[in-house]
Image (spheres, rainbow, N blue to C red):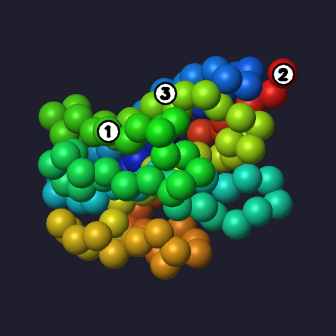
Amino acid sequence: QVQLVESGGGLVQPGGSLRLSCTASDFTFSGYWMYWLRQAPGKGLEWIADINTLGNAAYYVDSVKARFTISRDNAKKTLYLQMNNLTPEDTALYYCATDRTHAGRTALYGSVRRLSDFGSWGQGTQVTVSS
């Protein structure tokens, strides 16, 4: 059974930084495209970044580009999201997720609406940006 556990969220002031982690177990982590998603209060699920299986290609939604960096350590089965220059608009519950297919990239930006569009996902970690 695939299990993903996010951590690293918290309360941070505007302009601050956080690094989220997502630790995987019980599946071939290195064989899956991985995603970071978020859901702000009262809003829908937002795709914010993904990374290929090797970790050498990453893509971002425009609103986080140049501020957030997605990365992975396949040996540690861990996905990361480094978030810099945070703003109150980044306040949300952040999820990591796997693609639905092994080695495939099916959850493209704009094509996903819900967590069930992904293979597996964690419980989320809350990020609150406030002074």
Q: Position of residue 25 (x, y in %)?
A: 29, 45
Residue found 41% across the figure and 38% down from its top: 69
In the rendered structure, which amino acid carries the disc numbered 3? Arg
Q: Can residue 116 be spotted in the picture?
A: no
- From the top left corner, tell me how far across and down residue 120 is, in percent: 41, 62
Find the distance from the CA under tag 2 to the CA under tag 1.
28 Å
Marked residue nearer the N-terminal end (2 or 1): 1
Residue at (67% x, 23% y) in the render = 15
Of tags 3 and 2, the one toward the viewer is: 2
Q: Position of residue 11 (x, y in %)?
A: 72, 24
Q: Mark 3 or mark 1, which has the lower sequence index?
A: 3
Q: CA distance from mark 3 to mark 2?
A: 19 Å
Q: Is residue 53 left or right of residue 19?
A: left
Amino acid type at circle 2 is Ser
Relative to 107, is 96 above or below?
above
Q: Is 38 located above or below residue 82 in the figure?
A: below
Indicate the amino acid at tag 1.
Answer: Ser
Q: Nearer the viewer, residue 25 or 22?
A: 22
| Disc 1: CA contacts within 10 A as few (<14), some (14-19) or many (>=20) | many
Quadrant (top left, top right, bottom left, bottom right) of the N terminus: bottom left
Q: Residues within 10 Å of mark 3 (few under 14, many from 20)?
A: some
- The kind of secondary structure element at disc 1 is strand
Q: Which mark is residue 71?
A: 1
Q: Which residue is mark 2?
A: 131
Residue 118: mark: none
For disc 3, the marked residue is 19
